[in-house]
Image (cartoon, helix red, strand yellow):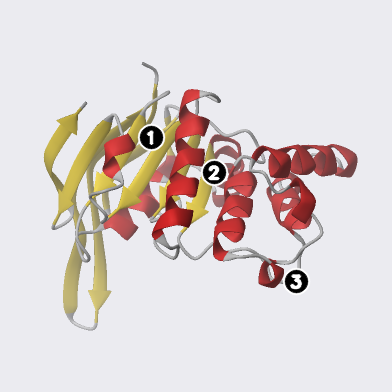
Amino acid sequence: MRQIIKLQDVWKTYKMGNIEVNALQGLELDVKEGEFLAIMGPSGSGKSTAVNMIGCLDVPTKGKITLEQHDISKLSESELAQIRGRKIGFIFQQFNLIPTLTALENVMLPMIFQGVDEEKRKERAAMLLGLVELGDRTNHKPTELSGGQQQRVAIARALANNPDVIIADEPTGNLDSKTGAIVLDFLQKLHKKERKTIVMVTHDASLVKVAERVEFLKDGKIVKSLRR
């Protein structure tokens, strides 16, 4: 399988006054095309920092991250944003929808930054909302949607630029178990039917059953791997 993202001996150190905290300590990880990868770990294990690195939202204190063979530390912020916008879609626990925009406008937003014209943005956003079974909610704002519906809008938004990789950070964390199961089912469909690469970060052991590979994170490094 083609390698899309690779982390080599990645460290991330934060300074808190005179104290240095190593959120990541030599993290080694690769993400291959077409796989469903779960990263699991307790609170404080470095999961959020790992998401930022895997998603190329931040640069490491030490080590190397490559995205499609590009060393991200050697790219300008605008170059990185362009590549990241095309290659990676993000689904966050807090949904991160813009409250003043409708569902359709929220899904259209990432396409603006890739230079897609307005008519094509509207057409694709409507198609994606239909895909997540929200075709009748296109003009609703986030406050007019349930938590599960908001998360499905976030899934549609993550697919806006047809990225290679979907990164889901605690995607069911703010949902009840029934709604969480629906969201998880959508992720499985994206993997199996749309052939998307999925990286799901979670502390919930019940979720990782859907993954082909599970990497267990503790103290900022991988301590165990499981393949199914």
Secondary element at image label 1: strand
Say which of marks 3 and 1 sits in front.
3
> In the picture, residue 140 is in which quadrant?
bottom right
Which amino acid type is marked by label 1?
Answer: Thr
> In the rendered image, which residue does mark 2 sit on?
89
The residue lying furthest to the top in this view is 1
Spot occupied by residue 103 in the image (x, y as percentages of width and height) = 73, 57
Secondary element at image label 2: strand
> In the rendered image, which residue does mark 1 sit on?
66
Spot occupied by residue 228 in the image (x, y as percentages of width and height) = 21, 26
Spot occupied by residue 193 in the image (x, y as percentages of width and height) = 53, 23
* Circles 2 and 3 in contact, beta carbons < 8 Å: no
- In-image side of 26 versus 129 (left or right): left
- In-image side of 9 versus 118 (left or right): left
Instruction: Specify the label residue 100 is tagged with.
Output: 3
The residue lying furthest to the right in this view is 119
Spot occupied by residue 195 in the image (x, y as percentages of width and height) = 50, 23
Which amino acid type is marked by label 3?
Answer: Thr
Say which of marks 2 and 3 sits in front.
3
> In the picture, residue 222 is in which quadrant?
top left
Secondary element at image label 3: loop
Question: Distance between the Cα atoms at labels 2 and 3?
Answer: 21 Å
Task: Name the residue located 54 percent from the left edge and 43 percent from the top edge.
Answer: 89
Say which of marks 2 and 1 sits in front.
2
Which amino acid type is marked by label 2?
Answer: Gly
- Dot 2 or dot 1, earlier in sequence: 1
Which is nearer the eye, 180 or 116? 180
